Image (spheres, rainbow, N blue to C red):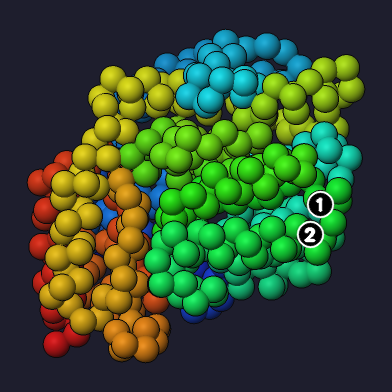
Amino acid sequence: PSVDAARDSRVRELTRAHVFTSWSAQAEIDPLPLAGGEGVWFWDHQGRRYLDLTSQLVNVNLGYQHPRLVEAIREAAGGLVTVAPSFAEESRAEAAAAVAGLAPAGLEKVFFTNGGAEANENAVRMARLHTGRHKVLAAYRSYHGATAAAIALTGEPRRWGAEPSIPGVVHFWGPYLYRSEFHSSTPEEEAERALRHLRHTVAAEGPQHVAAIVLETVVGSNGVLVPPPGYLEGVRELCDEHGILLVLDEVMAGFGRTGAWFAFDHWGVRPDLVTFAKGVNSGYVPLGGVILSDEIADTFAHTPYPGGLTYSGHALATASAVASIRIMREERVVENAAEVGERTLGPGLRDLAERHEVIGDVRGLGVFWALELVADRETREPLPADRVKAIHRACVERGVWPLMMGNRMHVVPPCVITSEEAGEALTLLDEALAGATA
Ligand code: PLP
């Protein structure tokens, strides 16, 4: 990376003057201008390079500037880039086939959107129209996006500013053993009690009024909460009992993040609707979508689906998805995520927890991990924000960039990270934790 102080300050100035930034108090931020990246590294205009443990917003699964993906987008730009959804177009057709090909049999059609929120927005609409019911159940400690229905599904403080939002969404508690709502002491107990709570919620809402249960297969930005054994299977059974649709949000967990193509592959659960975005093309071009079961797709065989987008299946986005899926397959990226998680990241992070009192819990799989930071291991009191910030600063000073969410450090590198790079990241985190908590 080279130093370009003039560029750095011009980008900062223009950003401060004209860019209105997501989720931020505009006068209180000064985002670092980025200059470039390659693989698991990105760098700024000041000549500093960072080992990336964020994948930006947990979406750059193939890492930065993957040459084959960049080339595929260049090539697509030379063709017909914008084709309305009312025409057919080759890369849209190929991308839909490729995405459906990764899903279980019987989920064959794909509705493309520009991102994850629109995917959830449409999944809710599809579920309501297919079932003729209006209620939707979603979990506390979830994030599903920032548009009307998606933010209504969201079960954390980011929803509050958008309320009142759409009616009909009811929240329930999902499993989270470290801070159990159910006083459980084992994963099995947590699964069973969380299922009992969900069953009671469905009964109290009137199962005949519930269109869908929406869940992040592995909860992402609310803490990398991996469902305990039996939980997802139990939710599927409950849905089947009452004709409720199961919508699994794979926006963050899908496309390699957990060491599987879809996170639900780990539990063999077949959803009725799958929402995806982020990793489908590593975010090189905005893209998301909904995969529909044949039954739901059939509802709209002779009745028009009342929804659409100018850019539903934009050629640059879908061409990049086709290329991305091909690269992931040929370069064994999903297998790599599983192996690095199992051999290096998982054991390495657990080892850090043995050495640093501040780490209360380590959880995750693949390249999807969270360290829960606590002020006191006994009481599990969350580490205060200023101390979390200090840990982040110590990491950044050492050239490693983790994603801080509340009192947690999320370790979510690109799925292409090698064991050596993961080892290097662990060493830097170890030094940073020692420095910041000394
Ligand atoms: N669903 C999940 C699980 C997410 O993590 C996100 C974004 O972080 C979304 C949906 C929303 O996606 P987007 O920001 O592309 O609208």
- Above or below residue 111? Residue 213 is below
Q: Position of residue 112 (x, y in %)?
A: 64, 30
Q: Which residue is mark 1?
A: 207
Are there few (<14), some (14-19), or many (20+) residues within 10 Å of tag 1? many
Q: CA distance from mark 1 to mark 2?
A: 6 Å
The answer to which quarter of the image holds residue 400 is bottom left
Q: Is residue 95 above or below residue 418?
A: above
Q: Residue at x 39, y 76 (%)?
A: 407
Residue linked to disc 2 = 203
Quadrant location of the C terminus in the rendered image: bottom left
Question: Residue 210, image x and y in percent?
Answer: 80, 50
* Residue type at tag 2: Ala
Q: State the image coordinates of residue 56 (x, y, percent, origin top left).
A: 39, 52
The one nearer the camera, 231 or 253, is 231
* Amino acid beneath label 1: Pro
Check if mark 1's residue and mark 2's residue have beta carbons within 8 Å. yes
